[in-house]
């Protein structure tokens, strides 16, 4: 019997199509032999499947969950029913041992898939100012109509209505982008349909190899043809007159597979048509789609976050979550988590209140410019980014593509009201410092925070030093109990320790991914005296750190945090450290006995 790889290897097969990450769906299933199996949904549109509690990939066929095996260019069912670890036979367990060279094979599959489906991402669209038009096409299925009463009006409201408040939303998609752009980008939507697809839902949504929906692009082309027959002029959706529509959006009836609905449903995503359609003298190539309803049961209309996320891809933004996270007992790299619409912020308030654009995202779109800090200064009463507050920037002197961004995030303010509360139920509020290490090539392939890369390239420097995700994928228990609150400065633990600074000598330290001018991996710039004011604003002090070696050597019995010149923590007791040069309290010191 062939041996199968664990999920840690399978995750190398991840996508290049932009999509929402899987909802952290855990479900118990009963196999035909009567045994029960606990499964977690993993992946996104290009590669998705369930995993067992110990991390083996599983695909479903006709209600039976089978172990999955990667081949040269696919992920296929083995026809061996999956079982929980404690009910497996000896031969079954033997089959599940990881084979040699599997990681290399899967990496090759990913490379081939990227070459087959290249995407334009990582560079902003030009001139994101003024009024632009977007097209939303409503598509029911032959066997599945929309259940939302007056679906066209409901979606028009969700897209365009000022102050839209369905299910506690804080505004429409138009409101969201208008607010992020400080009123300069007015995205108006035309909603057409509903039309009915030629086939049943299962025809378009059934999964092929790798869990990918087999015929979803046929649904998109049918939607284009139906809208064209209805009189839509596609020229008005070509924003820059380059002969290509920027994006069309198809909203289909029913649920989405990313929420744990059956594998016959469609997974929301953005992609390109393999064969672009030409209508009214322009080509339609880029599309996005998502479901009418949220969850797996009930008739609740999906929130605005999915559409905001997919249209943000249209603006050129990549994903800032770990697009290759699927490992057992973990949810992958932290990424930008709930702080970004391009990460798990799409899930804030059950998808109804997407987070404010970060300072990076606003600058990317040309809607704001971070203020670079060079000279020592005091910043007083920095307002929340969600209410128009500024973003500050601290740059590695030796690499302009590596920098910190600083902004006030306040869960009481506008679009950030959907952020998770702290452990006491209070809204989070503090200074978010996140570390950007830009690489054009990595942005272009949408792997900014991919776990297959050596570093995360846009990620908070958390005040509590904890970049673990909130829950394990199995069981839902906390592995980062302070969550978002622990990302922000100032920060106080339950034990009373306090962190209101980020310097070369703090923990976490002001470290770098590429060397500074002196060869160290430290920023040599200090953020200190971080204070949360009673009105929710933030104040802090900024200064540069000297890189000269202090004239005094470290006392061998001194106890502080010592770091090497690469920024790695080495210990607190100078007596136990070897001879050398260290960073202590932001200065270089020599230990020389």
Image: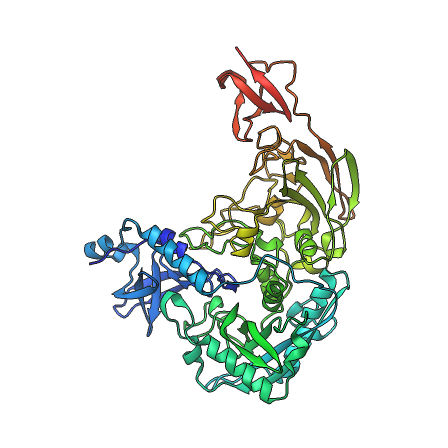
Q: Position of residue 448 (x, y in %)?
A: 54, 51
What colour scheme was applied to this rendering of the protein?
Answer: rainbow
Count of marks placed on residues: 0
Depicted 563 relative to depicted 2: above or below? above
Q: Looking at the figure, which quarter contains the N terminus?
A: bottom left
Does residue 490 show up?
A: no
Residue 137 or 146: which is nearer the viewer? 137
- Which quarter of the figure has residue 300? bottom right
Instruction: Give the residue displayed 54% in from the left and 79% down from the top.
Output: 277
**In the image shown, does 56 or 168 lie closer to the viewer?**
56
Q: In the visual, does 462 lie left or right of 537?
A: left
Instruction: Give the image location of residue 132, x and y in percent.
Output: 71, 71
Is residue 78 among the parts visible in the rendering?
yes
Q: Nearer the viewer, residue 429 or 553?
A: 553
In this view of the protein, which residue sits in the foreground, 574 or 311?
A: 311
92 in relation to 230, above or below: above
Q: Residue at x 60, y 49 (%)?
A: 484
Location of residue 142 in the rendering, given as x and y in whole percent from the top left corner: 47, 87
- Left or right: residue 54 versus residue 554 is left
Q: Position of residue 320 (x, y in %)?
A: 56, 54
Q: Is 575 rendered above or below residue 30?
A: above
* Snapshot quadrant of residue 138: bottom right
């Amino acid at each position: 019997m062939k041996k199968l790889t664990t999920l840690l290897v399978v995750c190398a097969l991840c996508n290049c199509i932009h999509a929402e990450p899987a909802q952290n769906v855990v479900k118990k299933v009963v196999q035909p032999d009567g045994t029960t199996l606990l499964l977690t949904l993993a992946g996104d549109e290009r590669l998705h499947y369930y995993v067992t509690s110990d991390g083996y990939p599983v695909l479903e066929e006709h209600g039976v969950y089978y172990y999955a095996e990667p081949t040269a260019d696919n992920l296929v069912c083995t026809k061996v029913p999956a079982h929980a670890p404690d009910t497996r036979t000896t031969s079954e367990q033997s089959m599940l041992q990881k084979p040699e060279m599997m990681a290399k094979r899967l990496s090759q599959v990913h490379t081939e898939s990227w070459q087959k489906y290249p995407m334009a991402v990582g560079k902003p669209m030009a001139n994101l100012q003024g009024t632009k038009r977007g097209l939303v096409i409503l598509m029911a299925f032959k066997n599945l109509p929309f259940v939302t009463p007056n679906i066209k009006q409901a979606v028009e409201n969700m897209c365009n209505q000022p102050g839209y408040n369905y299910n506690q939303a804080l505004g429409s998609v138009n409101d969201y982008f208008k607010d992020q752009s400080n009123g300069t980008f007015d995205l108006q939507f035309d909603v057409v349909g509903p039309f009915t697809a030629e086939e049943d839902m299962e025809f378009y949504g059934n999964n092929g190899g790798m869990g990918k929906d087999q015929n979803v692009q046929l649904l998109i082309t049918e939607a284009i043809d139906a809208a064209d027959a209805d009189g839509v002029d596609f020229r008005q959706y070509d924003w820059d007159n380059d002969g290509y529509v920027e994006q069309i959006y198809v909203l289909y009836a029913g649920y989405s597979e990313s929420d744990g609905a059956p594998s016959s449903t469609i997974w929301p995503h953005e992609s390109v048509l393999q064969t672009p359609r030409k209508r009214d003298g322009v080509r339609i190539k880029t599309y996005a789609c998502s479901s009418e309803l949220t969850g797996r049961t009930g008739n609740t209309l999906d929130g605005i976050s999915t559409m905001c996320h997919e249209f943000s891809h249209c603006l050129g933004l990549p994903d800032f979550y770990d697009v290759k996270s699927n490992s057992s007992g973990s949810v992958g790299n932290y990424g930008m988590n709930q702080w970004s619409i391009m990460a798990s912020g799409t899930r804030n308030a059950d998808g109804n209140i997407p987070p404010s654009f970060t300072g990076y995202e606003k600058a990317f779109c040309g809607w704001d410019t971070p203020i670079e800090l060079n000279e020592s200064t005091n910043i007083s009463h920095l307002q929340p980014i969600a209410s128009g507050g500024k973003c500050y920037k601290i740059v590695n002197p030796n690499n302009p593509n590596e920098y910190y961004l600083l902004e006030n995030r306040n869960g009481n303010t506008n679009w950030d009201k959907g952020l998770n509360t702290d452990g006491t139920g209070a809204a989070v509020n503090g200074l978010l410092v996140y570390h950007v290490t830009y690489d054009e090539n990595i942005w272009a392939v949408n792997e900014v925070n991919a776990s297959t890369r050596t570093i995360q390239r846009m990620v908070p420097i958390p005040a509590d030093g904890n970049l673990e995700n909130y829950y394990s994928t199995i069981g839902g228990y906390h592995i980062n109990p302070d969550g978002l609150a622990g990302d922000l400065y100032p920060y106080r633990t339950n034990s009373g320790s306090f962190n209101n600074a980020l310097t070369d000598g703090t923990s976490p330290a002001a470290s770098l991914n590429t060397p500074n001018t002196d060869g160290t991996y430290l920023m040599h710039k200090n953020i200190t005296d971080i204070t949360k004011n009673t009105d929710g604003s933030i104040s802090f002090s900024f200064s540069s750190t000297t890189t000269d070696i202090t004239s005094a050597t470290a006392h061998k019995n001194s106890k502080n945090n010592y770091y090497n010149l690469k920024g790695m923590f080495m210990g607190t007791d100078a007596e136990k450290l070897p001879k050398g040069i260290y960073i202590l309290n932001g200065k270089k010191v020599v230990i020389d006995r």
